[in-house]
Image (cartoon, rainbow, N blue to C red):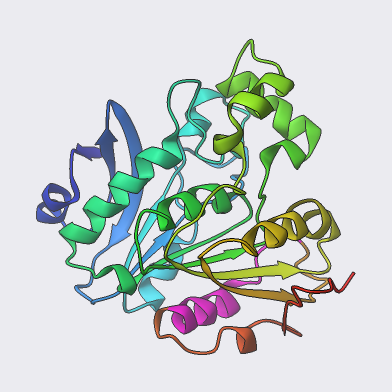
Amino acid sequence: MRVFYNFSDALKAGPEQIFGIVSKGFIFPCSWRITGHQKTVVFFPGATRPDTSRPSFQRSTYFSELPYNCISFFDPTLFFSPTLNLGWFQGHRNVFFAQHMKKIIQDLVRAVSCENNDLVIFGTSGAGIPGFNVASAVPGCSLYVGNIQSDVSKYYKGHYKELLDACYPGETAEYVEEHRKKKISLFHVDGDFKLFYAQNLADEFHYHRHFLPMVAALRSKKIKSSVYVYEDEKSGHGPLGRARELSIIQAVAEQNDVLSQLPCGKLFNFIEPLR
């Protein structure tokens, strides 16, 4: 895997490749396909299967079915432990990888000559923390997230402990929740971007522990929010499937109706929750 310090140099090396971008001494692996389209889609990952070779690039198989510039990132947090499968771009005590991604994506936008409002960020589950942080730094961009974790401390205890051991060794959960709050949660994030936030009602764990608290926080923000719920027992917390996700990406990119792409989709009632 070749390594570059900026996307302009990477683009000179080839419009379709796997490579790493260096930011302050850390390498952020990515895979891209640059078509020259005016729109660019950035994919952030959810959980990675433990038996998958690293780095891996979620949804990179979508590239050939989309006309847009596409890039998928791997979370280098997973390099801190061979068993860690979800890292939320945490980094470690003194480094927040999601913060690094802000400048990385700003450099990407410049390199491919993409206007901010032509940038689409897409991800589910663990993609919420990098997605929101990056979107807050790119005014006018669009962010689609589905079934995300809005507060890592409210995730499954075993996974949370594994993250703490890998990223914050020697620190208690209480210390992290007090002193690393802006790294492990989204409630403080705000910005001038368009948010498309979908939650499966069949995923009750995320609906109650992550979705409802995040929706409550959105009420006081300037984020242009479109919030949806849908019902799909088959997918549960998982992705909605290739065909449906591709249609969602295109709807966001082309400013078409996103709600109609969701199974039994409804606009969320901010005043009175459905459950």
Total marks placed: 0
Q: Residue 113: x percent and y percent?
A: 17, 67
Q: Residue 214: x percent and y percent?
A: 68, 56
Q: Nearer the viewer, residue 194 or 191?
A: 191
247 on left or right of 216: left
136 on left or right of 265: left
Q: Residue at x 43, y 26 (%)?
A: 95
Q: In which quadrant is the C terminus drawn?
A: bottom right
Residue 245 within the segment the image draws in magenta: yes
Task: In the displayed orientation, state which residue is furthest to the front.
Answer: 220
User: In the rendered view, would you say 256 is above or below 46?
Assistant: below
Q: Residue 237: x percent and y percent?
A: 74, 60
Q: Residue 224: x percent and y percent?
A: 51, 72
Residue 79 within the segment the image draws in magenta: no
252 on left or right of 145: left
Specify the segment rendered in magenta: 237-252
Which of the 4 image quarters holds residue 179?
top right
Q: Residue at x 18, y 38 (%)?
A: 5
Q: In which quadrant is the N terminus drawn?
A: top left
Q: Residue at x 80, y 51 (%)?
A: 209
